[in-house]
Amino acid sequence: MTEQLKACICRMNRNGMGLTVFLGILFWSQIAAAQVSKKLVPDKKRALQWKPDKGQYYFSHKLVYDYRNKADKTNGTLEIGLDPVTGAMCFRKESSFGKAGSYEFILAFPDGKYIYCGTEDGKKIRITELVSRLRPDKETQSQRQEDFATYCLPTGNSREDFGWPSVEYQLSYASSEAKDKVWLTQTPFAVYPLYGFELIEGAVSLPVSFDYMHLFGPNQLITELDSEDLKLKLIRIDADPFLALTRDYKEVKIAD
């Protein structure tokens, strides 16, 4: 405890203010400061390692979700690599989409480009797919905003998640009477690479569905979901650098 803090406590005791109240205020102010400090800052290596023109992509952080799927009776952790500057994401076989399949990692970009890298028949291959729905036209954007206003009603609860503003909504559906609670966090990076994973043609899938691109905005990251069948929560954003080298894989063209 610093001398300044000791002096402050003494003054408060003389003035009749409870020590418990003061320590409570101090505790929550420190928690708030800690959350703000978690805002993403790219590390210094990114400037040297991020070289898309040379088939080299550097992901300095990762999103870590905990999930429990009651319907499938599964639970676990989902990790997604992130470049905070561009919003590009990296899905790795061992921590994102499961060990099945031949792909080792899949890179996703806000412009709708997905790059699959893996091994097939002993050969390293690379496949590029463009999902145009990650770049919706004005009509689609307008419809999404209308649907959001219809099916996502704010509960009045708000908080900060990792230094960013979050709002809780009651999420309803046109096809059922179900009503879920969801927290959406406004991020400085695009999140459609995550939501667009549901649209790719590769035979891979995440352990939980993030099929929300038709409803949530391009910077609205789902950080918590509480539904009848699924509980999902973003528990950490870790600094965990990963260098993805797509140049080590030979490009394979897929016929339309």
Image (cartoon, rainbow, N blue to C red):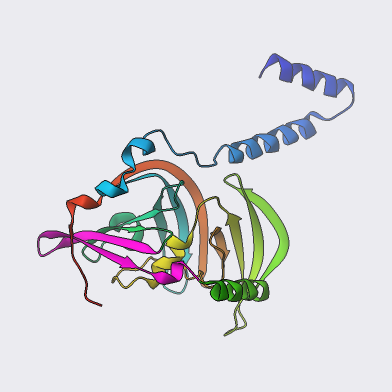
Residue 78 position within the rendered picture, expressed as x and y whole percent measured from the top left? 40, 57
Left or right position of 67 against 178: left
The answer to whether residue 53 of the structure is visible from this angle is yes
Left or right position of 186 against 27: left
Residue at the extreme bottom: 175
Answer whether residue 199 is magenta in the image.
no
Q: Nearer the viewer, residue 223 or 11?
A: 223
Q: At 42% across and 36% down in the image, what residue appears?
A: 43
* In the depicted structure, whether residue 241 falls above or below residue 224: above
Q: At 28% across and 64% down in the image, what residue appears?
A: 128
Q: Nearer the viewer, residue 221 or 84?
A: 84
Residue 217 position within the rendered picture, expressed as x and y whole percent measured from the top left? 57, 64
Q: Which residues are magenta?
A: 112-136
Number of callouts in the render? 0
Residue 42: which quarter of the image?
A: top left
Q: Nearer the viewer, residue 83 or 93?
A: 83
Residue 120 position within the rendered picture, expressed as x and y whole percent measured from the top left? 14, 64
Answer whether residue 131 is magenta in the image.
yes
Q: At 63% across and 36% down in the image, what residue appears?
A: 33
The answer to whether residue 208 of the structure is visible from this angle is no
Q: Main secondary structure of the magenta part?
A: strand
Residue at the extreme left: 122
Residue 62 position within the rendered picture, expressed as x and y whole percent measured from the top left? 42, 48
